[in-house]
Image (cartoon, rainbow, N blue to C red):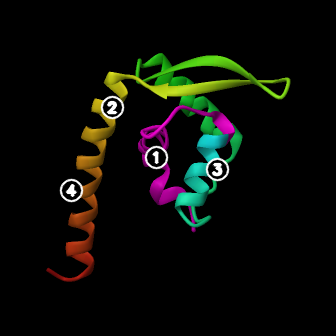
Amino acid sequence: MAREPFSGHLELLLLAALRGEPRHGYAVMEHVRRASGGRLDYPEGTVYPALHRLEADGMLTSRWSEVEGRRRRVYELTAKGTRALDSRRRDWESFSQSIAAVLEGA
Protein backbone atom coordinates (compact mmCIF):
# COMPACT_ATOMS: atom_id res chain seq x y z
CA MET A 1 0.00 0.00 0.00
CA ALA A 2 1.38 3.41 -0.90
CA ARG A 3 2.36 5.40 2.16
CA GLU A 4 1.65 8.88 0.78
CA PRO A 5 -1.98 9.07 1.95
CA PHE A 6 -0.90 8.02 5.44
CA SER A 7 2.34 9.99 5.78
CA GLY A 8 0.68 12.68 7.86
CA HIS A 9 -0.39 10.05 10.37
CA LEU A 10 2.98 8.47 11.15
CA GLU A 11 3.17 10.16 14.54
CA LEU A 12 -0.31 8.86 15.42
CA LEU A 13 0.81 5.33 14.54
CA LEU A 14 4.00 5.66 16.60
CA LEU A 15 2.12 6.97 19.62
CA ALA A 16 -0.37 4.11 19.28
CA ALA A 17 2.46 1.57 19.05
CA LEU A 18 3.76 2.85 22.39
CA ARG A 19 0.41 2.97 24.19
CA GLY A 20 0.60 -0.50 25.69
CA GLU A 21 4.26 -0.64 26.65
CA PRO A 22 7.66 0.98 26.19
CA ARG A 23 9.49 -0.27 23.10
CA HIS A 24 12.80 0.29 21.39
CA GLY A 25 12.72 1.87 17.93
CA TYR A 26 12.90 -1.33 15.92
CA ALA A 27 10.14 -2.90 18.05
CA VAL A 28 7.96 0.16 17.34
CA MET A 29 8.47 -0.36 13.59
CA GLU A 30 7.75 -4.09 13.93
CA HIS A 31 4.57 -3.41 15.90
CA VAL A 32 3.24 -1.05 13.21
CA ARG A 33 4.21 -3.51 10.47
CA ARG A 34 2.70 -6.52 12.25
CA ALA A 35 -0.49 -4.73 13.38
CA SER A 36 -1.11 -3.52 9.82
CA GLY A 37 -0.61 -6.96 8.35
CA GLY A 38 2.58 -5.74 6.67
CA ARG A 39 0.80 -2.96 4.78
CA LEU A 40 2.55 -0.15 6.69
CA ASP A 41 6.29 -0.69 6.56
CA TYR A 42 8.16 2.52 7.36
CA PRO A 43 11.95 2.66 6.98
CA GLU A 44 14.25 3.54 9.88
CA GLY A 45 15.08 6.86 8.23
CA THR A 46 11.43 7.86 8.61
CA VAL A 47 10.64 6.38 12.01
CA TYR A 48 13.62 7.49 14.08
CA PRO A 49 13.38 11.20 13.19
CA ALA A 50 9.65 11.06 14.03
CA LEU A 51 10.41 9.43 17.39
CA HIS A 52 12.97 12.15 18.09
CA ARG A 53 10.43 14.86 17.20
CA LEU A 54 7.85 13.33 19.51
CA GLU A 55 10.41 13.20 22.28
CA ALA A 56 11.45 16.82 21.68
CA ASP A 57 7.76 17.79 21.86
CA GLY A 58 7.43 16.08 25.26
CA MET A 59 5.18 13.28 24.05
CA LEU A 60 7.77 10.58 24.66
CA THR A 61 10.62 9.95 27.02
CA SER A 62 13.49 7.62 26.26
CA ARG A 63 16.20 5.78 28.10
CA TRP A 64 19.02 3.49 27.13
CA SER A 65 18.76 -0.19 27.98
CA GLU A 66 21.09 -3.07 27.31
CA VAL A 67 19.85 -6.41 26.03
CA GLU A 68 22.29 -9.22 25.31
CA GLY A 69 25.14 -6.72 25.20
CA ARG A 70 23.41 -4.40 22.75
CA ARG A 71 22.34 -0.88 23.71
CA ARG A 72 18.86 0.15 22.67
CA ARG A 73 16.92 3.36 23.16
CA VAL A 74 13.55 2.56 24.67
CA TYR A 75 10.68 5.00 24.14
CA GLU A 76 7.68 5.49 26.40
CA LEU A 77 4.56 7.66 26.23
CA THR A 78 4.31 10.60 28.59
CA ALA A 79 1.01 11.95 29.90
CA LYS A 80 1.20 14.59 27.16
CA GLY A 81 1.75 11.82 24.60
CA THR A 82 -1.27 9.92 25.86
CA ARG A 83 -3.45 13.03 25.56
CA ALA A 84 -2.07 13.70 22.07
CA LEU A 85 -2.78 10.10 21.05
CA ASP A 86 -6.38 10.36 22.25
CA SER A 87 -6.88 13.69 20.49
CA ARG A 88 -5.26 12.58 17.23
CA ARG A 89 -7.22 9.36 17.29
CA ARG A 90 -10.50 11.29 17.55
CA ASP A 91 -9.34 13.51 14.67
CA TRP A 92 -8.46 10.45 12.58
CA GLU A 93 -11.82 8.79 13.29
CA SER A 94 -13.67 11.94 12.25
CA PHE A 95 -11.55 12.28 9.12
CA SER A 96 -11.93 8.64 8.11
CA GLN A 97 -15.71 8.74 8.66
CA SER A 98 -15.89 11.82 6.44
CA ILE A 99 -13.91 10.10 3.69
CA ALA A 100 -16.05 6.97 4.00
CA ALA A 101 -19.23 9.04 3.70
CA VAL A 102 -17.99 10.61 0.47
CA LEU A 103 -16.88 7.27 -0.97
CA GLU A 104 -20.23 5.71 -0.11
CA GLY A 105 -22.09 8.63 -1.66
CA ALA A 106 -23.80 9.73 1.54
Give the x, y percent position of residue 66. Answer: 75, 21
Residue 65, horizontal then vertical, whole percent: 69, 20
Asked whether the residues under the numbered discs 1 and 4 touch, taking CB atoms below 8 Å apart as contact, a structural biologist would say no
Q: Earlier in the sequence, mark 3 or mark 2?
A: 3
Q: Earlier in the sequence, mark 1 or mark 2?
A: 1
Taking 57 as reference, is 94 left or right?
A: left
Residue, disc 3: 30
Question: Which residue occupies the foreground of this view, 103 or 65?
Answer: 65
**Tag 1 residue:** 13
- Name the residue tied to disc 2: 82
Q: Is residue 45 magenta?
A: no
Query: Spatial distance from mark 3 to mark 4, Cα to Cα?
Result: 27 Å
The 10 Å Cα crowd at callout 3, few under 14, some 14 to 19, many 20 or more, is: some
Say what secondary structure mark 4 lies in: helix
Which amino acid does the dot numbered 4 rest on? Ser
Q: Secondary structure at mark 1?
A: helix
Magenta highlight range: 1-26
Task: Tell me the amino acid under the disc marked 2.
Answer: Thr
What amino acid type should be assigned to the residue bearing mark 3?
Answer: Glu
Q: Residues within 10 Å of mark 4 (few under 14, many from 20)?
A: few
Label 4: which residue? 94
How many tags in the picture? 4
Q: CA distance from mark 3 to mark 1?
A: 12 Å
